[in-house]
Image (cartoon, helix red, strand yellow):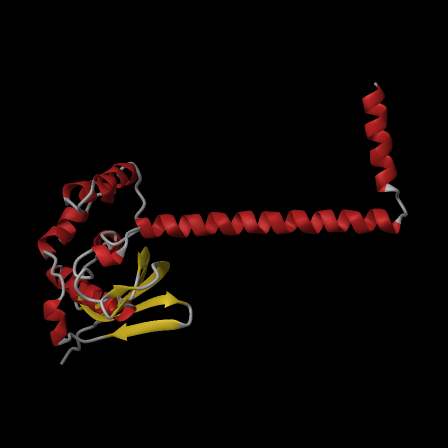
Amino acid sequence: MMKTTVNKYRFKFYLNARHGMVYEGKVGNLHPHTWEICIIIKTENQEFFKFSAIEKSVDYYISRYDSKLLNNIKPFNIINPTMENLGKVMYKNISKILNKNGWELLELQISENPTRTYFIDEYIEEMDLFDDIDPLNYNLENLEIENVGELNKNENLGSAENNKAGDVSSKRSYTRTEKMKIKKAKNQKITIKMFIGLILVIGIYFVLKYFNVDLYGILHNFVVTHTLN
C-alpha cells in the first residue's frame, strides 16, 4: 500500500499589543509586548500551494489585535487577557481558518518574551466560550491580493483609526509581519554602521596619540586662523 505523504510546515508571526492582568476585578498595570506566534500546520494536499496565501490569511487575522489594548477587544473584555488565553483564542480561530482551506493546525506556540512560551496542540472545551470568527472572511480565495489593507477596510474592525491604518497599509504589498522584519533589518544595519563609526573614531584617536600628534593644538590653530580671516 502506498503511503500518503504528509507535509508539515512552520510559520512565524509577530504581534505588538498591550494588556493588563485582571485580579479581583481590577486591571493591573498596562504594558506592551511583542508576541511571537509560531504555528505548525500539515496538509496531505500534494498540489502546488502559495504559502503567501497562508501567511496573509493568518496575518490578517492577527492584525485585528495589532497595536491595541487587548482588554478592550472580544473576548478579552470578558476573560483575562493572559498569554495562555490569547494562545487558546488564536488556536481556535486559526484552526478554523486553516481547516476551511484544507490545512490542519497541529500546534501553536506563543511567546511574550524570549524565556517564556506557551504551547497548545489540542482543542479544549473551554474554548467554546471564546470569541468566534467567520472563516468565510478568511477564505484564501479572497486573499489572493497583495493589499491586505483593503481587506482591513472591508471588515469593520471598530474604529476610524483602524480604517485609516488600513488605508495606509493598502498602498503597500508587504504583510504586517514582513514589514516588521524589514524594519528590524534596517535597525540592525543602522546599529552596525554606528558601531563601525565608533571603532573608526577610536582607531584614529589612538593613531594620533601613537604619533604624538597634538590634535587639540591643531584644532585650536584651525579655529583661530579661520576666525581671524
Q: Position of residue 217 (x, y in %)?
A: 88, 37
Which quadrant holds residue 71? Answer: bottom left
**As drawn, which residue projects farthest toward the top?**
229
Tell me the residue at 56%/51% (across/down). 191
Q: Position of residue 198 (x, y in %)?
A: 67, 49
Residue 17 in sight = yes
**As drawn, which residue projects farthest toward the right?**
212
Q: Say which quadrant the N terminus sits in.
A: bottom left
Q: Is residue 189 left or right of residue 148?
A: right
Residue nearer the viewer, 40 or 59: 59
Residue 147 in sight = no
Which quadrant holds residue 38? Answer: bottom left
How many numbered discs, if any?
A: 0
Q: Say which quadrant the C terminus sits in.
A: top right
135 vs 217: above or below: below
**As drawn, which residue projects farthest toward the bottom?**
1
Q: Position of residue 59 (x, y in %)?
A: 26, 54
Q: Is residue 214 left or right of residue 143?
A: right
Tell me the residue at 36%/48% (across/down). 179
21 vs 227: above or below: below
Residue nearer the viewer, 66 or 159: 159
Q: Position of residue 42 (x, y in %)?
A: 21, 69
46 vs 106: above or below: above
